[in-house]
Image: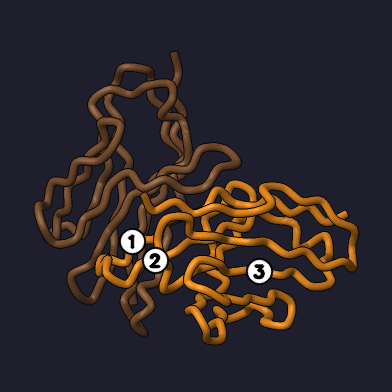
Chain colours: A brown, B orange
Amino acid sequence: AQSVTQLDSHVSVSEGTPVLLRCNYSSSYSPSLFWYVQHPNKGLQLLLKYTSAATLVKGINGFEAEFKKSETSFHLTKPSAHMSDAAEYFCVVSDQAGGYNKLIFGAGTRLAVHP
Amino acid sequence: GAVVSQHPSRVICKSGTSVKIECRSLDFQATTMFWYRQFPKKSLMLMATSNEGSKATYEQGVEKDKFLINHASLTLSTLTVTSAHPEDSSFYICSAKVRRILSGEQFFGPGTRLTVL
């Protein structure tokens, strides 16, 4: 079965410094992986997705993630944090069992950005 | 493209009443729609999966008689919380999937905040 582990429940950075949100996955076959962002009381917005093409995936708002099969990781990075990046981030793997393509969510990482 | 709307965005009701939440795909046909529940500061929990014209598939532990799902068309799914109680208060989020997108990517609605008094 697929699973996702987000290694940090909270990450705090200063504005202008790099962001690293860590995610490890478990999958019995080649997975599809996603990062979604959720601002307070809002729905989810897709940041980026990996679907077995390039291992370095670029997303919106300057975020990118690298798929590392040997480490079963899909960490999210951004070179320079902005105040507007403060939100909840979810690492997600697609579970294709049953043909319904369920999404399996990590527990989430809350990113705080300080001036 | 790929916009999903939910209505209402916020609802307050009395205990014992029923509440209906609508989820619409505005610019595409959604072959499958999903309903999630999110508790404060928690991750999303999948409640059920529905395909147009067929019965919803509920996740283990979700009461199908409590949470009625109807997926009458390729652009509309509804979730009805029957005989709501305070413990049903939560943030409900729907999402939609297009068959041609093989990655399993889902497009999410903005969510509905339900408060049961």
Which residue type does callout 1 highlight?
Answer: Glu
Cα distance in 3D space between marks 3 and 2: 17 Å
Chain letter of disc 2? B
**Circles 3 and 2: CB distance less than 8 Å?**
no
The residue to which callout 3 is attached is: B79
Q: Residues within 10 Å of mark 1 (few under 14, many from 20)?
A: many
Q: Residues within 10 Å of mark 3 (few under 14, many from 20)?
A: many
Q: In percent of the image, x 68 and y 77: which residue is there? A: B68
- Mark 3 / mark 2, whichever is N-terminal: 3
Residue A69: horizontal and vertical position, in percent? Answer: 14, 60
Using the rendered view, name the quadrant where residue A34 is placed. Answer: bottom left
The residue to which callout 1 is attached is: B105
Which labelled disc corresponds to residue B97? 2
Residue B75: horizontal and vertical position, in percent? Answer: 50, 66
Q: Is residue B107 above or below residue A86?
A: below
Q: Residues within 10 Å of mark 2 (few under 14, many from 20)?
A: many
Residue A26: horizontal and vertical position, in percent? Answer: 28, 67
Residue A77: horizontal and vertical position, in percent? Answer: 25, 36
**Circles 2 and 1: CB distance less than 8 Å?**
yes
